[in-house]
């Protein structure tokens, strides 16, 4: 019972949105993508800037058109827990929180199991890149707040990207920056009947799908990749897909991660230049 | 709604038993690989798994006793154990109460002074629930403690008894428990006849108390024989394998 | 149960895997012996118990209950589908590190992974139909419906619906980990597949009272039940652990402590991948990743075949016993 917050009535229903008569919802059958500017293999333009949060050791803010999230990194700081055994490696904790207004349906203030799992996955995606063995008895905390979510896959990959940039901004030694990107498999065009024996058209790979496109997806994949080391630090795929589609999507994602890497570099160099001019 | 007849005119209960008859008890020990001692007990349709870890280093330094071991009991009820699926949180008051009962039952029996500054954990997992869970848990815990090789003065055997319609009966099942019968759970040390736990939640007339009590004591002795037989068989088995 | 591993032990395991010899004598792609039994818990719609030699013991139960339909407010999707709700719980008796709140994180991780692999649903069926029916033949529309009503778990959710828009069957899949000996995910999925095979849902009779009102009755006949539609397409998962430069299957607890990266591959019997998730704190090269996916896929498919064969054998022998009038004894925990 959270007495500080005034909760709405217990039974509340989202309002029904009446679309005008000529409003056409996007479907995969249409030739173009939802925002009609991109090709299936194009990602959304990224806006990435560091130094958003003054108090944090490092911070980053990322926007992928409608997906917006902020990341703050605190540390390295000493581990406070008394019962904790000595650990030669640093402890990385990540927490991801969706703001209550970030999704179409209002989210709970308390962390729900999905957020807890995403936090765990984020830790696993970032750990291979950080030199934790240089920070014994210390803890690094990464906090991500999602302000607006336009597609769960893109949200998560943006979180990985922002977290790596924030860690670099905080001056924590890393082996490489981790870039994250997502893709969805969407069936375009009608599938031919299975009974006729003909092969159905394989689903098309749409890079960086947004919320409307995700509604039609048969599966999705999120990949976190370290370009200089050529190592995948995390892969998460859900939904049914053939093996060939998966290998194709992994290759596409790796290419996209290389492009994102350039953007991350650029943002970090900008922040260094700013600091120089300030000094 | 027709009233369920708990006792037929011939004196048979719902599942065809006589009032002073126990359900079929089957048990075995050493079922888990990670626990120091474990036991699985089936009391009719009630299935319970007990695991004992210990003596081991105490988790909470503040609670360590310098001359004795501390006993820690945890209950876990599987969501599919009752008729309708229900998830019970770990902090359910009822489960915590039952856990403290089991702890009180074993504290005088386990020779804790032999294991100073350590902790003995008893984990009870209820897989299927058909009445008499507390008694099954205590019996399973006894077997698990013996399997773990922890020193005890005696076996602890538990049995429920109650007043079903017009007769005293032992080992009540779920249907009998949920209807308006009084129920007593007794945990007893069979050789010395001492009682370490007595628990009752309903109303029972004082005149009937003695009858119910003696019947429960008889039941405990019967259970003791069954459990003892299983443990001796398992020990012989182990001895044979070592030769 | 060690939660620490000494550098000497780690080195021993690492070097052994390089030479294709594991600590217990297996080779890299070898599985331990798996024992499986269905129908162990009587108050459920279906249940199974899986034991991997060396310690892992998982009990999975499926309970079918009636509940309201879950409708997505935006798309209107889900009005004609049933639901599958999964949960995984690690009993504190399973391992020293699971006492108190220790198992919470692991429970959450396994539950989310399980629900992702089993109930990721396809694209919204209703809006799909409205656009395809105008441009293609009715047979095509019917086939797209069939494709989209099943989740990635293969189970046909629309068959679980009793009254569209109101009531449906909800399958609660609960997995209980009783003993920890490494490789939990594989055991949980094997148990789930066997339990769903064993599940029998009572038939329902729907009466149309007119005016949009429906009434239904659950037939109480123990013999007149139906099986879960689409259960052959349920996926199985294979966990591959990368240690050093090689990868192994079915890791024991010590090997799991040495793992740099873990990949869980879920595959169904037609070779489609139903899910992929990486765990632990290390990286994998893309080429090695694709190789691991490939070997996981082949192994998964052969596992499904073996599992189906043994479940069928058990079901047949049970049926034969019943026909002869012999009681069917389930060994449960008394199996040695």
Image (spheres, coloured by chain):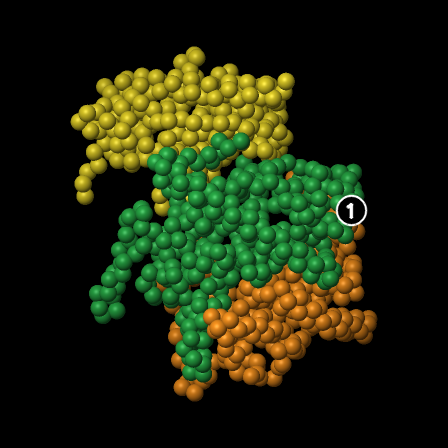
Chain colours: A orange, B yellow, C green
Judge left or right: residue A135 versus residue B191. right
Q: In the image, what residue occupies the spot 59% across and 33% down?
A: B33
Q: In the image, what residue occupies the spot 51% across and 61% down?
A: C152
Mark 1: few/some/many CA within 10 Å (<14, 14-19, 20+) = some
Toward the viewer: A277 or A42? Answer: A42
- Secondary element at tag 1: helix
Task: Give the residue number, with chain letter if any, for mark 1.
Answer: C18
Rendered view: B119 above or below A84: above
Q: Position of residue B12 (x, y in %)?
A: 23, 27
Q: Position of residue A83 (x, y in %)?
A: 65, 39
Image quarter hosting the C terminus of chain A: bottom right
Examine the image and state in which quarter residue C292 appears. bottom right
Q: In the image, what residue occupies the spot 43% across and 27% down?
A: B26
Q: Position of residue C63 (x, y in %)?
A: 40, 49
Residue B165 appears in view:
yes
Toward the viewer: A261 or C82? Answer: C82
Toward the viewer: B195 or B83? Answer: B83
Examine the image and state in which quarter residue A71 appears. bottom right
User: Across the whole image, how many numbered discs are drawn on residues?
Assistant: 1
């Amino acid at each position: 019972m959270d007495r500080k917050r005034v909760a709405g009535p217990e039974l509340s229903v989202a309002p029904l949105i009446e679309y005008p008569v000529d409003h056409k919802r996007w479907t995969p059958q249409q030739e173009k993508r939802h925002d009609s500017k991109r090709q299936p293999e194009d990602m959304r333009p990224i806006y990435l800037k560091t130094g958003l949060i003054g108090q944090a050791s490092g911070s980053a803010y990322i926007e992928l058109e409608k997906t917006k999230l902020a990341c703050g990194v605190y540390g390295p700081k000493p581990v406070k827990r008394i019962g904790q055994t000595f650990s030669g490696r640093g402890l990385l904790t990540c927490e991801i929180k969706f703001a209550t207004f970030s999704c179409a349906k209002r989210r709970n203030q308390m962390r729900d199991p999905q957020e807890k799992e995403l936090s765990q996955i984020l830790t696993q995606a970032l750990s291979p890149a950080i030199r934790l063995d240089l920070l014994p008895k210390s803890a690094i905390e990464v906090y991500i707040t999602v302000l607006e979510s336009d597609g769960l896959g893109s949200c998560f990959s943006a979180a990985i990207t922002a977290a790596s940039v924030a860690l670099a901004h905080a001056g924590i030694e890393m082996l490489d920056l981790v870039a994250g990107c997502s893709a969805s498999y969407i069936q375009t065009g009608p599938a031919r009947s299975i009974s006729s024996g003909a092969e159905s058209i394989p689903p098309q790979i749409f890079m960086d799908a947004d919320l409307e496109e995700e509604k039609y997806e048969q599966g999705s994949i999120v990949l976190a990749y370290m370009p200089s080391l050529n190592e995948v630090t995390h892969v998460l795929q859900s939904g049914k897909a053939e093996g060939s589609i998966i290998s194709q999507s992994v290759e596409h994602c790796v290419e996209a991660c290389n492009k994102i890497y350039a953007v991350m570099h650029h943002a970090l160099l900008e922040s260094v230049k700013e600091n120089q001019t300030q000094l | 709604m027709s009233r369920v007849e708990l006792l037929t005119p011939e004196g048979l209960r719902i599942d065809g038993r006589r009032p002073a008859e126990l359900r079929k008890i089957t048990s075995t020990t050493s079922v888990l690989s990670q626990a120091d001692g474990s036991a699985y007990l089936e009391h009719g349709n009630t299935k319970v798994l007990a695991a004992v870890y210990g003596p081991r280093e105490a988790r909470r330094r503040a609670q360590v006793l310098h001359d004795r071991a501390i006993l820690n009991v945890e209950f876990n009820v599987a969501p599919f154990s009752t008729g309708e699926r229900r998830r019970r949180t770990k902090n359910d008051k009822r489960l915590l109460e039952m856990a403290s009962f089991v702890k009180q039952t074993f504290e005088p029996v386990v020779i804790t002074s032999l294991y100073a500054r350590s902790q003995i954990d008893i984990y009870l997992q209820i897989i299927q629930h058909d009445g008499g869970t507390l008694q099954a848990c205590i019996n399973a815990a006894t077997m698990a403690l013996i399997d773990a090789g922890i020193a005890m003065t005696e076996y602890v055997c538990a049995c429920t008894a109650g007043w079903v319609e017009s007769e005293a009966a032992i080992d009540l099942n779920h249907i009998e428990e949920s209807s308006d019968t009084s129920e007593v759970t007794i945990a007893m040390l069979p050789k010395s006849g001492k009682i370490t736990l007595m628990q009752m939640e309903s109303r029972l007339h004082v005149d009937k108390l003695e009858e119910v009590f003696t019947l429960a004591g008889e039941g405990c002795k019967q259970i003791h024989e069954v459990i003892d037989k299983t443990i001796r068989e398992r020990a012989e088995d182990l001895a044979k394998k070592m030769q | 149960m060690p939660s620490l591993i000494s550098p000497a032990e780690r080195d021993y395991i690492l070097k052994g895997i390089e030479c294709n010899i594991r600590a217990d004598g297996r080779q890299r792609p070898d599985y331990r012996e798996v024992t499986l039994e269905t129908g162990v818990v009587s108050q459920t719609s279906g249940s199974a118990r899986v034991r991997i030699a060396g310690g892992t013991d998982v009990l999975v139960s499926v309970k079918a209950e009636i509940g309201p339909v879950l409708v997505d407010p935006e798309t209107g999707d889900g009005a004609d589908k049933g639901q599958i709700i999964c949960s995984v719980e690690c009993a504190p008796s399973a391992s020293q590190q699971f006492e108190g709140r220790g198992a919470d994180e692991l429970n959450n991780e396994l539950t989310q992974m399980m629900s992702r692999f089993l109930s990721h649903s396809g694209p919204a069926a209703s809006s799909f139909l409205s656009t395809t029916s105008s441009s293609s033949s009715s047979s095509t529309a019917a086939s797209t419906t069939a494709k989209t009503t099943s989740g990635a778990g293969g189970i046909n959710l629309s068959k679980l619906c009793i009254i569209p828009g109101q009531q449906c069957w909800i399958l609660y899949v609960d997995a209980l980990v009783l003993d920890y000996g490494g490789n939990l995910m594989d055991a949980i999925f094997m148990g789930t597949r066997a339990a769903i095979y064993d599940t029998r849902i009572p038939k329902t009779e729907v009466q149309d009272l007119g005016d949009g009102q429906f009434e239904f009755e659950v037939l109480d006949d123990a013999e007149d039940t139906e099986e879960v539609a689409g259960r052959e397409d349920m996926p199985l998962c294979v966990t591959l652990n990368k240690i050093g430069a090689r990868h192994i299957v079915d890791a024991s607890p010590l090997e799991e402590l040495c793992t740099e990266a873990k990949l869980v591959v879920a595959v169904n019997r037609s070779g489609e991948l139903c899910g992929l998730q990486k765990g632990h704190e290390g990286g994998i090269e893309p080429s090695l990743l694709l190789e691991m996916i490939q070997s996981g896929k082949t192994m998964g498919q052969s596992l499904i075949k073996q599992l189906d064969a043994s479940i069928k054998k058990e079901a047949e022998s049970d049926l034969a016993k019943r026909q002869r009038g012999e009681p069917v004894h389930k060994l449960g925990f008394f199996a040695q």
